[in-house]
């Protein structure tokens, strides 16, 4: 009889301990929650310096001879600028300037000679308006263009002027690492014209120059 009582009490104690032990077991569905790491939105504000290079092509008319040529070449140079972006806004406003060496030239037959249009250097001062998608920014740009126009006719002295014109274009810029950004842009520029007198070109003529530019750039933002 005593053995039966002790056995019953032992079974009751064992049954009572099972739920408590089960409560202490880890549950596979109750994983600890960890919030994602906060990544701050990139801000484009600041000064930057960089290099740029690419190709250019265009048109040049010599109205005194009723001919035109199609200069083309390469260019490479430096860039400096400043961007401003209000916190929380995607709009980026900036001012950018650049100066490039250029190998832009072409010649065409004119009379018994040849007429060559040449550009040795090119620069711009432009405003930029961009719309930032965090570290990626498409932009529009426009402003003043500067450069020389050399009008050379074989057998004559020719003429050369430094002109101020205008330029418009668009581009894409993105962050590649840290403060480094890379860009690709297209510009159209009109440098106006230079006048070559009859004594310098054989026939008095105006020589104009319009340029298409496709170039890339690498900038470091401070």
Image: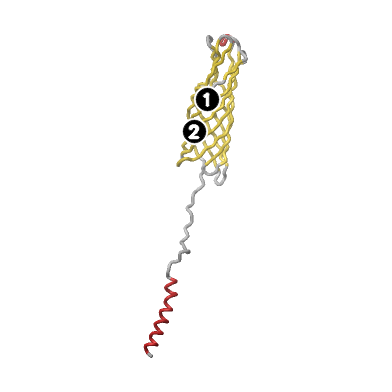
Q: Which badge, 2 or 1, is on the more N-terminal residue?
A: 1
Seen from the viewer's position, the closer of residues 180 and 1 is 1
Residue on which disc 2 sits: 217
Q: Where, by quadrant of the figure, is residue 23 drawn?
A: bottom left
Residue at image point 55% right, 24% down: 57
Number of callouts: 2
Q: Where, by quadrant of the figure, is residue 92 drawn?
A: top right
Seen from the viewer's position, the closer of residues 129 and 46 is 129
Quarter in which the N terminus is drawn: bottom left
The image shows residue 194, relative to residue 40, as above or below, that is above
Seen from the viewer's position, the closer of residues 49 and 18 is 18
Give the percent coordinates (x, y) of residue 38. Answer: 49, 52
Give the percent coordinates (x, y) of residue 16. Answer: 43, 78
Disc nearest the viewer among 2 and 1:
2
Q: Residue furthest left?
A: 3
At mark 2, the secondary structure is strand
Residue at image point 51% right, 44% down: 42
Q: Determine whether label 2 and label 1 are within 8 Å by CB.
A: no
Residue on which disc 1 sits: 122
Name the mark on residue 167: none
Give the percent coordinates (x, y) of residue 153. Answer: 54, 12
Seen from the viewer's position, the closer of residues 96 and 218 is 218
Residue at image point 43% right, 74% down: 20
Report crowding for label 1: few under 14, some 14 to 19, many 20 or more residues within 10 A (C-alpha): many
Task: State the scheme by which the image is colored.
Answer: secondary structure
Give the percent coordinates (x, y) of residue 201. Answer: 57, 11
Alpha carbon separation for disc pair 2 and 1: 15 Å
At mark 1, the secondary structure is strand
Report crowding for label 2: few under 14, some 14 to 19, many 20 or more residues within 10 A (C-alpha): some
């Amino acid at each position: 009889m005593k053995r039966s009582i002790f056995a019953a009490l032992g079974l009751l104690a064992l049954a009572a301990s099972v739920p408590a032990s089960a409560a202490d077991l880890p549950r596979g569905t109750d994983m600890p929650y960890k919030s994602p790491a906060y990544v701050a939105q990139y801000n484009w504000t600041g000064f930057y310096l960089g290099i740029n290079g690419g190709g250019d092509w265009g048109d040049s008319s010599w109205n005194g001879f009723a001919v035109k040529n199609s200069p083309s070449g390469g260019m490479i140079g430096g860039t400096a600028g400043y961007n401003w972006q209000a916190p929380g806004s995607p709009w980026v406003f900036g001012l950018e300037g650049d100066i490039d060496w250029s190998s832009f030239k072409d010649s065409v037959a004119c009379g018994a000679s040849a007429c060559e249009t040449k550009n040795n250097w090119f620069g711009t001062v432009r405003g930029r308006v961009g719309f930032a998608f965090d570290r990626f920014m498409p932009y529009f740009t426009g402003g003043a263009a500067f450069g020389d126009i050399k009008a050379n006719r074989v057998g004559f002295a020719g003429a050369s002027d430094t002109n101020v014109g205008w330029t418009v274009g668009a581009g894409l810029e993105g962050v590649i690492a840290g403060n480094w950004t890379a860009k690709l842009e297209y510009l159209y520029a009109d440098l106006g014209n230079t006048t070559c007198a009859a004594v310098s070109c054989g026939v008095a003529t105006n020589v104009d120059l319009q340029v298409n530019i496709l170039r890339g750039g690498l900038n470091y933002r401070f």
